[in-house]
Image (spheres, helix red, strand yellow):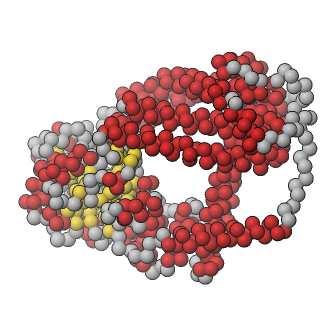
Amino acid sequence: MRTLRTELLTLLAVAASDFVRSWKRLLVTDLAFKVVYLALLAPISGLVLRGFLWTQGTTVVADEEILWVALSPIGLAGLALLAAVGIVILALELACLAAIGHGTVHDVRVGAADALRFVSGAVGKVFGVVLRVVGLSLLLAAPFLAAAALVFLVLLTDFDIYFYLNARPPVFWMAAGLIAAILVAGLAVLVPRLVSWLLALPLVLFEETAAARALAASAARTRGDRKLLALLLAAWAGLSLGAAAVVFGALRLAGVWLLTPLRDARPEVLLPLVGTLVLAWLAANEIVSLLSRGGLALLMVRAHDRSSPSSSAAIGTSAAVVPAVNRPPRRRLLAGLIAVAVAGTLIGVYLLNTVRIDTDVDIIAHRGAAAVAPENTLAAIERAIADGADWVEIDVLETADGEVVVFHDRDLKRITGLDLDIADATWEELRVIDVGSWFAAEFADERIPRLADVLELCRSRIGVVIELKYFGRQERLEERVARIVEEAGVVDEIVIMSLDQGGIRKMRSLRPDWRLGLIVAVAIGDLNTLDADFLAVNVNLATPLFLRSATAAGRDVYVWPIYEELEKARMIGRGADGLITNDPAAGRRVLAALAEMEPLERLLLDAALWMGIVPRARSRPAGDADDEA
């Protein structure tokens, strides 16, 4: 009698044999479905996004607005449509891959076109299975997700979220532990069901089982093999992750080996090499995708074949011998190498043309020089000036008595440990509180400054980026900021920005000639249609395409959070107009280094960073988190 371990290894071995015999057809199918994804999901996504934006009467929604739009009826319907289409396309691809695998198991050559024709006749059944699996999974998961959300609301909403993320008090770990336990319990309920439904797709494809009966039939067929199938899926997941690690790890090692000694290489050598590495990276993504999806489909087929009552052949005995691999003719090999070289050269030239030559970039000190002094204090601002920053970025809120103070969080918990909201405190209460000792003892005399104090300190020395902070209780923030700026006589030395589009619209109505910007972490729609003179975007949004489109629209882009010197170099190379950084001195060093580099050297650096082959040394201020500017 076969042991569980033997059964598992046998199934994996024969599935691997199936993959070797059919990988070309699997590859063609996977690539074809990638085209289908683009052809269907792109226009559907566009329609859904337009629906989102239409409900808001705008061309773009960003950050927390996205959540409220997504929870609206049209938002939920749009998300459900996108998810449904994506899942159905994935299921149809798995069905086609399984059809190829089924033919391989039974020594019948099934091509990609044959599989597509076969599965096209079973689209309704596949959709029915997907609908039932997704619906039942959501029903099973809903109580656990609701319980996790309830834990968050009860335990982690008393103070500003940055307090919990940075201080991580006992209640944070209690909430994290409870949420983790709830999610693990949810997985313990959901995973066995998913395992029991593993054969549903093969049953509707190869035994013409009705979709309404497929899940129950699969559960009955797998009843004695649940442990084996669970191990099989775990092995598939582990092998998929391992393959990704090996493929991308090997590519990074190759990049280090090839790029490191070629800093001074001639353009005719460097450009094809960088372009070829880009091609290799794209090929690596396809390899990982093929191994993951193709492997899952083949394992489903083998599991179904093993459980089929009509199949008397033992697993491992029905697989045909893998044919010998024929070596490609030399001419074909040579033509392939020439094609790769030409494509690599063209890609390299294109990349070189996207490299920024000038280094006219503003260094914006995030909450002052927050890496070396307590954030949003006069000491941090003085240090930013000394370190050569072009601008200092500060956050402003209203107190209970209408004073505008410079502080980031809605409460004092993270910085001082005090349970006190800024909006509930008067200026007289706040002005005596130590906001420097948390950073270092030498800053014990630092206090919360007023906006007027900061403007007086910065006058004619450094520009000031004023971020309007809204926590639901700011009544006249825009008016008061405008009055303070004008009284200080520094209108030409400040800009205003905020996460809140409504606040910026109000400021625009009050002071239409002022320079105003929006902070964006995530967005839906075209950011270049916003009524903003500049955008302060999360580094993940600062793609080369976005930066080029913003430049073409005449809009400056400032990028945050920039903690690493190599990140600074990459953003400068892509065309960012400003870097919002805790360490302005480091920003100056990067600008000086880039000014001495040739365009090809910058291309080499950007290619290395893109592939993640250059070690990074992260430097950030104590207690800081990856938050908005």
* Residue 316 visible here: no
Q: How many tags in the picture?
A: 0
State the image coordinates of residue 29 (x, y, percent, origin top left): 70, 45
- Furthest residue toward left: 487
Seen at 83% across and 28% down, the residue is 306
592 over 69 or under it: above or below: below
Seen at 58% across and 61% down, the residue is 611
563 over 347 or under it: above or below: above
Determine whether, in the image, residue 605 is placed left or right of residue 70. Answer: right
Quarter holding the N terminus is: top right
Seen at 18% across and 47% down, the residue is 506
265 over 326 or under it: above or below: below
* Residue 285 visible here: yes
Q: Quadrant of residue 327?
A: bottom right
Pick the front one: 201 or 498: 201
Pick the front one: 68 or 407: 68
Determine whether, in the image, residue 257 is placed left or right of residue 51. Answer: right
Determine whether, in the image, residue 253 is placed left or right of residue 503. Answer: right
Q: Quadrant of residue 102?
A: top right
239 over 311 or under it: above or below: below
Pick the front one: 511 or 230: 511
State the image coordinates of residue 229 (x, y, percent, origin top left): 74, 29
Seen at 53% across and 42% down, the residue is 41
State the image coordinates of residue 107 (x, y, percent, origin top left): 88, 38
Q: Quadrant of residue 394?
A: bottom left
